[in-house]
Amino acid sequence: MLATATIADLLATVVQNRPLTSDVNILTIECPAIAAAAKPGNFVNIKVSDTTQPLLRRPFSIHNVEGDCIELMVKSVGKGSSLFCNSPVGARVMVLGPLGNSFSASGNFETALLVSGGIGTAPMRFLEKALLAEGKKVINLIGGRSQKELLALNLSNCRFATDDGSAGFKGTVVELLHSELAGFGEAESLKVFACGPNPMLKALAGFCREHRLACDLSLESVMGCGIGICYGCSVELRNPDGTIQPILLCKEGPVIQAERIAL
Ligand SMILES: Cc1cc2nc3c(=O)[nH]c(=O)nc-3n(C[C@H](O)[C@H](O)[C@H](O)COP(=O)(O)OP(=O)(O)OC[C@H]3O[C@@H](n4cnc5c(N)ncnc54)[C@H](O)[C@@H]3O)c2cc1C
Ligand code: FES
């Protein structure tokens, strides 16, 4: 997991806005400096403005990088994300990034299990590309409450879990992971990468600890500045000696090793 070296705060243009579902859009933003420096797991802090609303900055994972552009997968949940989601092509937004640390696509494992829930699939496209470039095998395990919440744009080898059984495995994505593990031989080395709601990530961290699986999780917290100034993103992690330590997730995360999650 590497910290980001070069951070820019740029006025950038929305060059494409594609609806993916009724409340999730893919926004393409031209910002060459951020696209060039971005790594899978990094996020950007976006300030959207219009004439009637106050300025807002909100964090979004980098979904993909294509040339001079970054792509963001944005779900409308409240005022800031809805305003951003509905940005017309040509809209100008402030983009601060790339922020945070990153997933490491290299390392001593053969198969990457990408476990995501809901909008947590957002960083997986960029991560999958990096893993495939490293010669790793990739399997996506994707969870949602029902079929219409499953997001799998441009992801390969997808297996699904839904709470209501409307698609794929009926149950949580952690239970799906459990059922999939039986298909791997003893000798196959695995690593789990995950992003999703914090309760899902806590359950996954416990599961991976129990099954001795290496696992990196991208956590969420409310973030104001994204650069260690406001102290709004403090979360408690466990040190190897068992003591609990608060960290700023925007600086030391959002990617955290599962064994550091205080259960
Ligand atoms: C590192 C990181 C990466 C993220 N990546 C994505 C992504 O790729 N796509 C995506 O759709 N969403 C992502 N989110 C969540 C997204 O930032 C929030 O949904 C958004 O900030 C909500 O703003 P709002 O004004 O629409 O909602 P509000 O009306 O302010 O609140 C709605 C909900 O969002 C939560 N929330 C509010 N502000 C924040 C904030 N600054 N950070 C986190 N949660 C907040 C509130 O607790 C509440 O539950 C990410 C969050 C973090 C921390
Ligand atoms: S978001 Fe401000 S300190 Fe982390």
Image (cartoon, helix red, strand yellow):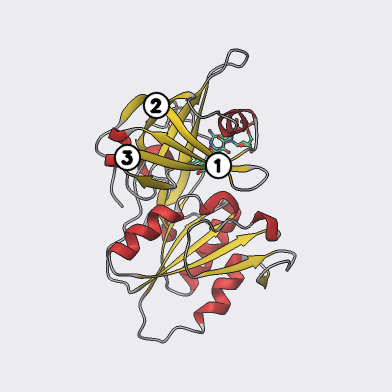
Residue 118 in view: yes
Query: What element does badge 2 sit on?
Result: strand
Residue at 47%, 66% in the rendered image: 156
Separation (CA) of disc 2 from disc 3:
12 Å
Q: Position of residue 183 (x, y in %)?
A: 49, 84
Quadrant of residue 42 within the rendered picture? top left
* Quadrant in which the C terminus is drawn: bottom right
Ligand 1 within 8 Å of the CB at mark 3: no
Vertical order, 34 against 53 (above or below): below
Q: Measure the alpha-carbon separation of dots 3 and 1.
A: 19 Å
Q: What amino acid is found at the position of numbered circle 3 in the picture? A: Ala
Label total for image: 3
Q: Which mark is residue 12?
A: 2
192 shown above or below 98:
below
Q: Give the CA distance from mark 1 to mark 2.
A: 17 Å
Say which residue appears at 40% left-offset and 29% top-offset: 95
Q: Position of residue 70 (x, y in %)?
A: 39, 40
First in sequence: mark 2 vs mark 3: 2
Q: Nearer the viewer, residue 71 or 108?
A: 71
Q: Which mark is residue 35?
A: 3
The three-letter code of the residue at mark 2 reads Ala
- The residue under label 1 is 18
SS for tag 1? strand
